[in-house]
Image: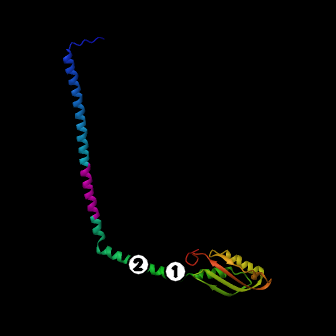
Amino acid sequence: MITINLLSPQEKTERVIAERYRYAYQILFAGAALIIGAIIILFAMQVFFTLHTRTVKEMVEAQETLVETPQVQALEKDVTTFNAYLKRIDALIMAHPAWSRILADIANRIPEGIQLTRLDAETKTGVINLGGKARTRDEVLALRTNILGSPFFTGANFPLANLEAERDIEFSYSFFLKEDALTKDL
């Protein structure tokens, strides 16, 4: 296909320039529309967040007035007083350790044929000294094994003198409490 252009070179140039201006105006108009649209969206967001912030502030102020009522203040005072009582009770519990569980455990672990003549217990060091009489060496060893099987003890001092005699033995042991044996339920 052949196209014939009957326009003069000046008219051609003018048309090209007019077309370019039209494209430039369209691009400028589209850019301006985008900028105006962005400004409108940003303004709407600002209005929304301002209103939302006011609403949140009003809700917080309403909650603060509820919290500052005399009933709530009285409850806070009661809770503070109760917490102080609990701290005192904890201090009393810590000052008076629970030896009864440990003594009952020792009593349940003493084998037949053993007679305790001495039991010394130190709260600060956690050492319990046992002394007594046994009919046989096996009973002395059974006592040691039974005590070490307790959840309250961690080790023992076992003098070899406990094993010198075969019958009618006078023995002594030192057992060591686990760190939290006096305060923790095992």
Type of residue at label 1? Met
Q: Is residue 59 above or below residue 159?
A: above
Q: Residue at x 23, y 48 (%)?
A: 43
Q: Amino acid at mark 2?
A: Phe
Instruction: For label 1, count other residues whose C-alpha is less than 10 Å away and answer few (under 14), some (14-19) or many (20+).
Output: few
In the displayed image of the protein, which residue is found farthest to the bottom?
A: 117
The image position of residue 169, as x and y in percent, is: 76, 85
Q: Badge 2: few (under 14), some or many (20 or more) residues near its Cα, within 10 Å?
A: few
**Residue appearing at x 32%, y 73% in the figure:** 72
The Cα–Cα distance between marks 1 and 2, rounded to whole angstroms, is: 18 Å
Residue 154 lies in the magenta stretch = no
Residue 49 lies in the magenta-colored region: yes
Q: Report the number of numbered marks.
A: 2
Q: Which residues are magenta?
A: 45-60
The disc label shown at residue 94, or none: 1
Residue corresponding to mark 2: 82
**Mark found first going from the N terminus, 1 or 2:** 2
Closer mark to the observer between disc 1 and disc 2: 1
Q: Quadrant of residue 148?
A: bottom right
Question: Could you say where residue 186 lies in the image, as x and y percent from the top left?
Answer: 59, 74
